Amino acid sequence: MKNENVITFNRPDDWHLHVRNDDVLAAVIGDTSRDFGRAIIMPNLPTPITTRSMATAYRDEILNQLPDKSKFSPLMTCYLTDTTDPDDLREGLKSGAYTAAKLYPAGATTNSNNGVTNISYLDDVFDVLSELGCPLLVHGEVVDDNVDVFDRENVFIQKILIPLRARHKKLKIVFEHITTKQAVEYIENENPSCLAATITPHHLSINRNAMFQGGIRPHMYCLPIAKREEHRRTLLRAACSGDEHFFLGTDSAPHTKETKESSCGCAGIYNSPCAISTYLQIFEQADALGQFNDFASKNGPLFYNLPINTELVTYKKENKPLVFPNVVIDADSVEVFSPPFNLYWKKATS
Ligand code: DOR
Ligand code: ZN
């Protein structure tokens, strides 16, 4: 008989993760290495990772902070700027120092001031990525005071993504942390082999009301900002469909309470400790646990041309709601994402 309180799947990967450096890295990396085989590490440190030697040093710093015997593998990315050297990028990708390159439109989010001001400067960089079959990861929002913050993703599709794909037909693109119906439908309608998207646990769990529940809720604020309920429902449909264009990327982004609970609070939601439990809860509610392995463990490696993790992990449903304590960093802490429903799925294997 089928046991509906147990699920076994290939060890998942996180295809979009922020772990920072120094004491924050030391405090958070165990929450990812415990549950995931690999993670695409975002390069938006205060001094961004713009060269392959920086990527190698950052990778070593992460490896040094891993718990003993961890087999977790960080996959590094290059932070693109207006002056990225295509040759350094090519060497970095060929040598494995980088797995992908990340496009932050300048000013779009945390530590994006050195990001790209005009993507037409990067045609040589996109040619290198196309030549090597390595993905361009995009933060898909336009930065323009005349564009409403809730429309930034849709305008990005029209103004940036469509022309970019027309100019670079072989370029593989991951549209990161999508938040809109328009993004899902664009991908579904195009049905391309060279475009995919990551979906976060928080964008599957909350709509924009969550930021204003009885007052301003800084721990529900991230970028791209959560949208209306109809968008959340469309994301849910896409994630739960098993469609190979959609896969897991937490966008877990730790900021201390002091920096979030401020007159100008940082964007970012820290969800690593509860990410798998949250996704499982959502898939269960949607009666889609049968598609979970595709979303969490298969579609990502297929797109990145990497092997699927062979190790299997098992999660069991507890009777009582799980509790995820905040992460303490000196006198401060990082608050763990709390979805508006209880979580019960707990890892049963080590
Ligand atoms: O909410 C976000 N936080 N969105 C991003 O794009 C960056 C991230 C961060 O680094 O904190
Ligand atoms: Zn991110």
Image (cartoon, rainbow, N blue to C red):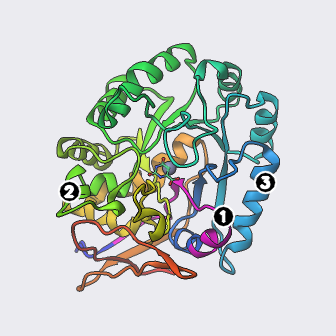
Q: Quadrant of the N terminus?
A: bottom left
x 24%, y 50%: residue = 208
Check disc 2 and report the residue beneath it: 286
The mark that comes first in sequence, 2 or 3, is: 3
Q: Are marks 2 and 3 in contact (CB under 8 Å)?
A: no
Q: Is residue 119 above or below residue 345?
A: above
Check disc 1 and report the residue beneath it: 21
In the image, what residue type sits under mark 2? Ala
Q: Residue furthest front?
A: 263
Whether residue 287 is visible to the viewer of this picture, yes or no, is no
Residue 56's disc number: 3
Ligand 1: does it lie within 8 Å of the C-beta at label 3? no
The mark that comes first in sequence, 1 or 2, is: 1
Q: Is residue 240 above or below residue 323?
A: above
Q: Is residue 31 above or below residue 320?
A: above
Tell me the magenta residue range: 7-27
Q: Residues within 10 Å of mark 2 (few under 14, many from 20)?
A: few
In the image, what residue type sits under mark 1? Asn
- Between circles 2 and 3, the one closer to the viewer is 3
146 sits to left or right of 131: left
Q: Position of residue 328 (x, y in %)?
A: 51, 80
5 sits to left or right of 293: left
Q: Residue furthest bottom?
A: 320
Q: Is residue 154 above or below residue 308?
A: above
Q: Are marks 1 and 2 in contact (CB under 8 Å)?
A: no
